[in-house]
Image: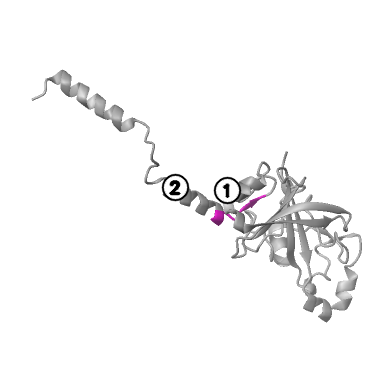
Amino acid sequence: MFPINQTIAFVILSLIVGCSPNTSPPNFSAFNLFQSKSDILNNTVIIPGKSVGGVNSKTTRADLVKMFGESKLKDDVVLEDEGTISVPVTKVNLGNNKNFTVAWEEEARENLLYVRDFGSAWKTPEGIGVGTSFKELRQKLGNFKLTGLGWDYGGFINLETTKLSEYQGQISIQLAPEQEAISKHPQQHEAVLGDRELSSTNPNWEPLNMKVSQMTVHFDE
């Protein structure tokens, strides 16, 4: 038998060796990495002003590569403000209605401007996303005002006096009518055209089968 002091010393030495840094990666590291990426890919929640899944105000293009891989990204330039401003963007193609586009302040793509072009899988905590119907919006927002149709800024909701007024300035929600409905109801369509603000209670909206066609998320500083 070992003397008690030698036994204690052996136990302590075993603990030290067991706790020593291991130069080879632990067996579970790949699993944790997979879980992390899986969480990111499956997170399709939009928190207006805060985050779009794993994307937030500090995200850079390099971060997008780490999250989704270079093969899922495509850089492009889009025209804004009726074609007067060029904006660098990165399109994130995740499939399964999870696509979205990040706009940047500069060509280096290091300072995020906004996120838009969401697939239908993306929703706010209230369940609002591309494809949400006019009727559903009235249930979630209460009565609201929106701009008339027929121009670049047509169909935008004013959230200021709604149940989600805290989102004003953090998310833009744009509605559009179905083309078939326009053909069937030309008079109702003409009645809601123009650069003006109209109430959601206007009866001309209902036959146009309006739905959310675009959402743009802006981030708090």
Boundaries of the magenta span: 41-47
Secondary element type, mark 1: helix
Give the residue type that dot 1 points to. Answer: Lys
Q: Position of residue 124 (x, y in %)?
A: 65, 54
Which of the pair 215/145 is nearer the observer?
Answer: 215
Q: Position of residue 87 (x, y in %)?
A: 80, 52
User: As displayed, is residue 40 above or below residue 209?
Assistant: above
Residue 32: mark: 2
- Per the image, the residue denoted by label 1 is 66
Compared across the picture, whether 146 is left or right of 56 comes to right
Question: Would you say residue 220 sits in the magenta stretch?
Answer: no
Question: Would you say residue 45 sits in the magenta stretch?
Answer: yes
The residue under the point 68% across, 59% down is: 118
Q: Position of residue 32 (x, y in %)?
A: 44, 47
The quadrant holding residue 179 is bottom right
The residue under the point 82% across, 58% down is: 145
Which of the pair 188/73 is nearer the observer?
Answer: 73
